[in-house]
Amino acid sequence: MMDIDNGCHSPLRLGNISDELSSEARGGSLISSTVRLAEDPPFSARTIRWKRHQLSNVWARYLDRVNVLGNHDHGHTGCVNALSWAQGGELLISSGDDQDIRVWRMDPSADASEYPFSCQSVIHTGHTHNVFNAQMLPHSCRIATVSGDKEVRVFDVGGAVGHSPTGSEMTYTTHEACIRILRCHTGRTKRIVTEDSPDLFLTVAEDGTVRQHDLRTFHVCGGRGCPAPLVKLSHDLSTIALSPLTPYQFVVGGESPFAHLYDRRHIGRYLYEEWGMSPAANDATTCVRKFSRHSRAPGEPKGGEHITGARMSAWNGHELLLSFNSDAVYLYSTKDEPGNGERLKKPPVLAPNMKLRNRTGDLDTGKESTTIDIGDDHDSSSDSEDEHEDLTIDAEEQDGVPAIYPRARFAGHCNVRTIKDVNFLGPYDEYVTSGSDDGNFFLWDKSSGELVDILEGDGSVVNVIEGHPSLPLVAVSGIDTTVKLFAPSRGRAEFSRVKQATNIVKNNARTSRRGLQANARMQIAHLFLHYSALASRRSHDEDGEDAMQCINQ
């Protein structure tokens, strides 16, 4: 185990952001080339509100790429699947297909770029498959990772997060850094959520379980040595969300048309399994709330629904974003009562003839922004074939639990190829953002539904978008081996694609349609193989003891 140095206890504070913001009026830069990071005294509530207001105004500006972390010779060597800010935003944690953790730190003494992050440390995780998520546990120097090898690993990286004595990148082996390997899950582990604790965190996996890990206790994995899961569902899970304002509640989603909200204070125990007996057929975890859409996307086959991303608001604790594969992003509230709800009026939030602000104009000219007409989020040529298609979702057909329906819908992006996260941005969570298969990430105004910007974030696909906890700064990653940083800029944004919004949205609609058709054909092929195998087993009088391998991977 590594020694923990003082680097673990120096959260980033936004020093004199007010001075820098007011410098605009004097012709200064929006954010100075080196943001002063200082240990300010505790702010009053009034000061905090004022700073949030100022930051919100900055977020309304024009984002542009300000830095790229890594290159062909330095940085990750595979897709970057995991991004998270740590220690108040002083550190950026990244990981991915190369199975290494990289710890990036802002260096205020450097002036090569506006946001000069450099890689301080590299930790070899020892995972044998892609790392899907990496989070630093609060009030500690521990980083937890989850991977396709079904393992959860914990690393004590006290030395790794401190300033390098030589200024160069430090490398740590698995033996030097890894302090715990947890093999409780039986499927690929996909996500981690932390709470205000250095010891407790939750993980979700494709085995349909949510597990709570407490590093203060020890157990031997295997058999019945692992603690019982908090949640166990019959379908794969791929995402989990938790708000720091209500850490006892969490939402999970996966290969189901529904997301479920659970309350740890009311979750029971799986007594049958703890006694070594087969669980009863109705022995299911009871959820507090269930979230659904009124209908599937046009062309989306029944049984092929998949929630790829979930995020709860850190600002108000009750708003929830869900991203559906081959469909849109939906906004819910955990405070809403279940019931039929009002269907989202057509046309949706992103619709024909909706006026879109052009955010690439010159801020200093004082001219009014132009408008752009953008198309609907599905291919109009397919309307006739879907006119009589039953796309409704019976939210009570499975468990009888009434569902909560969305308050808003955000569309225009494409979510077919890979697992897309979704997120809030801004000091009041006033923006909604999602990656897309076209290499862009989309930014919507949460209250109005207006598409604010489209930014090029990757050469292929954008999967992860994480906003800095106190600066107007966004980290973006995807299929590329690099991490891109975006921040407000002055004048024309080089990487904004909002002027091409009409074509981008139409192309994404066509891509989504083709993706749904391909998925439908694949599901038919899988069903054919499945029933062919069943028929073959019956013809040979097999007793069914050999379980079929999953063919939908």
Image (cartoon, helix red, strand yellow):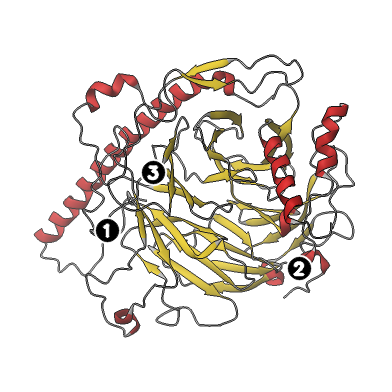
Q: Name the side, left or right, on which 121 lies relative to 549.
A: right
- Residue 288 in picture, x, y percent from top left: 36, 63
172 w.r.t. 456: above or below: below
Q: Circle 2 is placed at which residue position? A: 158
Residue at (90%, 47%) from the top-left corner? 109
**Residue drawn at x 33%, y 48% as measured from the top left:** 292
Helix, strand or loop status at disc 3: loop
Q: Are marks 1 and 2 in contact (CB under 8 Å)?
A: no
Q: State the residue in front, 239 or 294.
A: 294
> Mark 1: which secondary structure?
loop
- Disc 1 target residue: 401
Q: Which mark is residue 406?
A: 3
Q: Which amino acid is tagged 2?
A: Gly
Q: Is residue 124 shown above or below 107?
A: below
The N terminus: image quadrant? bottom right
Q: Marks 2 and 3: in contact by CB < 8 Å?
A: no
Q: Tell me how far mark 3 sits from mark 1, CA to CA.
A: 16 Å
